[in-house]
Image (spheres, grey):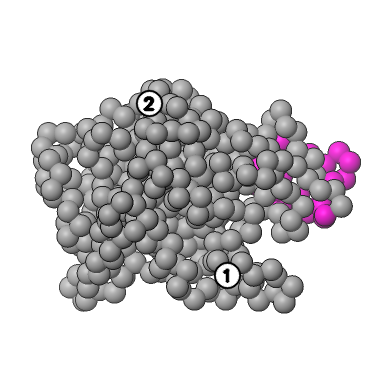
């Protein structure tokens, strides 16, 4: 597969140039104006942030993208699907309230907001997965698939199950309905080693399914309630929680790639990723720990695989921030160094398999040319 072009610019600006204007310049240089948007519905997929989390992308960036779409004659809307776990985004009404509280509304973004899988997360459509190995079809939020054009706007960050949360994660998991998320998460359930459990109860605080109890003094995960999201694994500081299926995170990454392929297949797509506020865990958390890496820049491409690979490569070259989860791990004299920022941040994760599988099924190329814009 030939190299894809990924366009990059850092967060430096001049006195008369805002970051949002610089983002617009970047996506135009990357070719967004080549897409015929005249009179067409354009879905802009992003994460509105869980209540209490402050690491999500600011609505100003969404407006910058929506304004470019409108200048090209398109009709943009921001969208996301409901969460699998109980939280502030588990149904469309609470999800919209959460988005509004976090600053996303028609005034701040210049467009409407639609929750793609409807009121209860059941308004989905079964979409064929091209070259799917784990999923023959994907359950995608209907509004995502009703759009003529698809744009992803991603906050690139760490993640407790997939190593990092990038473009493929934003598309694949983010566009899955609640049933689709279940399909992606059903490869295994975590269990607790009681000899390692310290009864700190951090895992129970992170569990969105009320699946963890302490009747015996140690954590116990009820497999009937557990949805397999893996948040407890990332929460445990003592490696007491692991997955029954050792390949579960690898399979999860492959399913995410296949869901992303279903979303992007056979229509114009464009992808944007911002490496800023690189929190150690997902924006689905009701909090955000200190960034593990410095703010690096904004990237755009027609190829979601190349875009994620470019973001990974930039992050791996960056110096970790000392006062962070990653920095603390690396400073621990007993830490087993993986020489990989994402695995040293969350050691139970896998991320390479996601990109390898995405390339294998033809979603994009890991080979890219980085075009730098000042």
Task: Name the spot of residue 48 as percent of width and height, x first.
Answer: 41, 46
| Residue 223 x/y as whole percent | 72, 32
Stretch of the chain drawn in magenta: 196-218
Magenta segment includes 216: yes
254 is higher (above) or lower (below) than 3: above
Q: Please state the horizontal and vertical placement of residue 307, each as a whole percent of the image.
A: 34, 56
Q: Which residue is mark 2?
A: 127
User: Residue 339 got which mark?
Assistant: 1
| 2 or 1: tag closer to the N-terminus | 2
The structure residue drawn at horizontal position 45% and vertical position 27%, both measured from the top left corner, is: 136
Residue 148's place in the image compared with 47, above or below, is above
From where the camera sits, is residue 91 visible? no
Report whether residue 5 is seen: yes
Q: Nearer the viewer, residue 12 or 140?
A: 140
Report crowding for label 2: few under 14, some 14 to 19, many 20 or more residues within 10 A (C-alpha): some
At x 22%, y 32%, the residue is: 148
Question: Which residue appears at 12% of the width and 40% of the height?
Answer: 36
What label sits on residue 128 in the rendered view? none
Residue 186 drawn at (x, y percent):
60, 33
Determine the residue positioned at 31% across, 60% down.
Answer: 368
- Asked whether 347 or 69 is in front, the reply is 347
For the C terminus, which image quadrant? Answer: bottom left
What is the spatial separation of the Cα atoms under label 2 and label 1, in whole angstroms? 38 Å
Judge whether 286 appears above or below 36 on screen: below
**Circle 2 SS class:** strand
Rate crowding at label 1 as few (under 14), some (14 to 19) or many (20 or more) other CA atoms within 10 Å: few
Q: Is residue 102 above or below residue 316?
A: above
Closer to the camera, 109 or 197?
Answer: 197
Q: Is residue 264 left or right of residue 98?
A: left
Q: Of helix, strand and loop, which mostly describes the magenta segment?
A: loop
308 vs 228, nearest the viewer: 308
């Amino acid at each position: 597969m030939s190299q894809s072009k990924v366009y990059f610019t850092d967060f430096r600006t001049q006195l008369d140039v805002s970051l949002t204007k610089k983002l617009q310049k970047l996506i135009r240089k990357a070719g967004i104006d080549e897409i015929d948007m005249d009179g067409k519905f354009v879905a802009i997929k992003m994460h509105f942030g869980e209540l209490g989390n402050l690491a999500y992308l600011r609505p100003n960036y969404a407006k910058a993208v929506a304004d470019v779409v409108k200048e090209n004659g398109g009709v943009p809307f921001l969208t996301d699907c409901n969460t699998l776990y109980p939280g502030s985004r588990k149904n469309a009404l609470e999800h919209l309230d959460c988005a509004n509280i976090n600053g996303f509304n028609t005034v701040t973004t210049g467009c409407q907001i639609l929750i793609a899988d409807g009121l209860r997360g059941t308004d989905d459509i079964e979409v064929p997965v091209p070259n799917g190995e784990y999923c023959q079809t994907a359950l995608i939020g209907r509004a995502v698939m009703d759009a003529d054009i698809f744009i992803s706007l991603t906050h690139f960050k760490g993640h407790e199950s997939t190593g990092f949360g990038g473009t493929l994660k934003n598309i694949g998991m983010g566009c899955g309905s609640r049933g689709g998320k279940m399909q992606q998460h059903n490869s295994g359930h975590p269990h607790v080693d009681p000899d390692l459990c310290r009864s700190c109860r951090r895992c129970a605080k992170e569990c969105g399914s009320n699946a963890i109890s302490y009747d015996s003094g140690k954590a116990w995960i009820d497999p009937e309630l557990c949805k397999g999201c893996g948040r407890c694994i990332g929460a445990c500081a003592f490696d007491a929680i692991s997955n029954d299926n050792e390949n579960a995170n690898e399979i999860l990454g492959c399913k995410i790639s296949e869901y992303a392929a279903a979303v992007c297949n056979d229509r114009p797509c464009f992808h944007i990723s911002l490496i800023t506020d690189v929190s150690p865990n997902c924006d689905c958390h009701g909090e955000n720990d200190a960034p593990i890496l410095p703010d690096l820049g904004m990237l755009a491409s027609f190829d979601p695989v190349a875009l994620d690979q470019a973001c990974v490569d930039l992050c791996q070259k960056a110096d970790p921030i000392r006062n962070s989860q990653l920095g603390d791990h690396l400073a621990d004299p007993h830490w087993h160094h993986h020489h990989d920022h994402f695995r040293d941040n969350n050691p139970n994760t896998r991320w390479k398999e996601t990109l390898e599988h995405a390339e294998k099924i033809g979603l994009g190329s890991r080979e890219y040319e980085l075009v730098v814009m000042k």
